[in-house]
Image (spheres, rainbow, N blue to C red):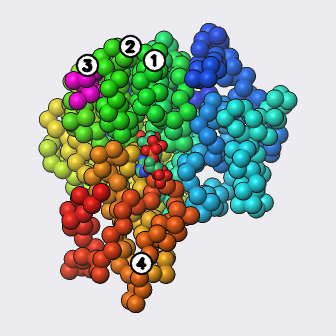
Amino acid sequence: MTVSATTTASAPIDPYGWVEQVVASDPDRPAIATPDGRQLRYRDLDSSAAAYAGALAASGVVAGDRVLVQIEKSVEMILLYLACLRMGAIFVPLNTGYTDAEIDYFLGDSDPGLVVVSPAREADAITLVNGRAGVVTLGEKGDGSLADLAARAPAAPPRPAPDGDRLAAFLYTSGTTGRPKGAMLTCGNFTSNAAVLADSWRFTKGDVLLHALPLFHAHGLFVAVNTVLAAGASMILLPRFDAGDVLGWLPRASVFMGVPTYYVRLLGETGLTREVAAGIRLFVSGSAPLLAETHRAFAARTGHQILERYGMTETLMNTSNPYDGVRVPGTVGPPLPGIEVRVVAVETGAPLPDGEVGLIVVRGPNLFKGYWRNPAKTAEDMRADGFFITGDLGMIDSNGYVHIVGRGKDLIISGGYNVYPREVEAELDALASVDESAVIGVPHADFGEAVVAVLVPRVGAVIDEAAVREAMTARLARYKLPKAYVIRDALPRNAMGKVMKQQLRTELAAVL
Ligand code: MCA
Ligand code: AMP
């Protein structure tokens, strides 16, 4: 069946308008505070974004250029993001954990006009970029060559005319096949989704979000930051998630967002009490399944029902448990206003009745514009009727709530980070001692799922696990590294020759 809500929040089509609107009426309103005492008002966001836009332009960036960014989480990173929105450049953030081998691919694929790295990485980045783009630096303390340029207040480039279809950012997502693809997100995706979230989650200008997520993924940037800005609210920007720090700052905030691992870790702290959470009006979870037992344990300890929502990079947020109605543990709630969610048969694509499990497909103003320079892959994932195929398996119950029951795609979600087994297997298979490999996710108390690799040695070869670990560490970000290696004579295969990963998952469920 299809479910969709009836109202669509009217939204501006220029995300930088979020800042301009507040500056026009209430420029001294608080925007960002940091633990080390920095306080930015909306007028500061605006003047700094203009200065950074000027610095980008002075570095050769023009509207439509990609700005590839791998810097530490900081106020500066948000200002750089706003500068890109302000001038119509495309913000392309990268996980700070990516290795040079991974970055090399993103460089080639995104074809950036400028690369922004932390000051400590400057020399390495210049070598890696090798003349393919300009390289500038930006540090957490407002240091670096781009900050120096911005401090000289170069003329800000003109504001482009509002255009909901204009590209605002790319986020790289991997896939079950092929290399990572840049999901092209538009200004209209941002403004429509943030307006719907701000409305559905009852954000007001008085809200203070405690921000502990990374800024290089959709959750931390396009759900957390965009929703705060769309509401004209403010945030406390923590440099990273640390359960003790979060408990220390919770009393000064009204909203908290996290991946399930954050809630599991908070529950591990004796300091998580009703009192410490008393000022929070909303805890949101997403990016990976929140176990019903975590939901219940959190409610018992704090009195708060965590609100679980569901989305993905290509679609931003699709569904959310209600703010006022019943939040059902183990479900991701009904579709957000203006967004249609359908469950269809895996084989035929035909819509299924309530209660039947199939592929989740989604349609609405939240859908990305496609994969950068990859129309074939875009066409594969986008149905003729305009619904995007999420690759998630689920069903819709008689109350219209969506239940995610599994994944039709071979994907491991570890601590909220996606790991595509194919990518890890490709690196393992390239090793001289490895004949073939199978990478699976197994249950993990902290990360939800953790990566495990099964290796088959080449005839006559011996696999040296320490050497494999070292080789993988040089190639892949640490969160993708297998937490255990299992050596087998052969992989289990079905009659079609396909590796039976489910059998491996069952056999190795307790390997960690
Ligand atoms: C760190 N490690 C991990 C992970 N994080 N391993 C597997 N999975 C992970 N997620 C590695 C570290 O490199 C280290 O390895 C070892 O595990 C222990 O690190 P630890 O200190 O515990 O890690 P941490 O620094 O505390 O990080 C854990 C974390 C972090 C705070 C849970 O992973 C995190 O912030 N996750 C959030 C991801 C996120 O924002 N996802 C949203 C995607 P070693 O000892 O070898 O160095 S957006 C999305 O999914 C869609 C749109 C949506 O719906 O939101
Ligand atoms: P990403 O590619 O990082 O955007 O991750 C998107 C994927 O995360 C979705 O396709 C889902 O598989 C998963 N996901 C996000 N939110 C939830 C949730 N609340 N419950 C279960 N899975 C989720």
* Horizontal side of residue 370 vs 322, given as left or right: right
Q: Residue furthest bottom?
A: 460
* Residue 114 appears in the picture as rendered: no
* Residue carrying label 4: 463
Q: Which mark is residue 253?
A: 1
* Residue carrying label 3: 303
Q: Position of residue 4 (x, y in %)?
A: 29, 34
Disc 1/disc 4 C-alpha distance (Å): 51 Å
Q: Say what amino acid the circle numbered 2 marks.
A: Gly
Height in image: 366 above or below 18? Answer: below
**Residue at 40% in and 44% down:** 416
Disc 2/disc 1 C-alpha distance (Å): 7 Å
Closer to the chain start, of discs 1 and 4, is: 1
Closer to the chain start, of discs 4 and 2, is: 2
Closer to the chain start, of discs 1 and 3, is: 1
Disc 3/disc 2 C-alpha distance (Å): 12 Å
Q: Which mark is residue 279?
A: 2
Which quadrant holds residue 153?
Answer: top right
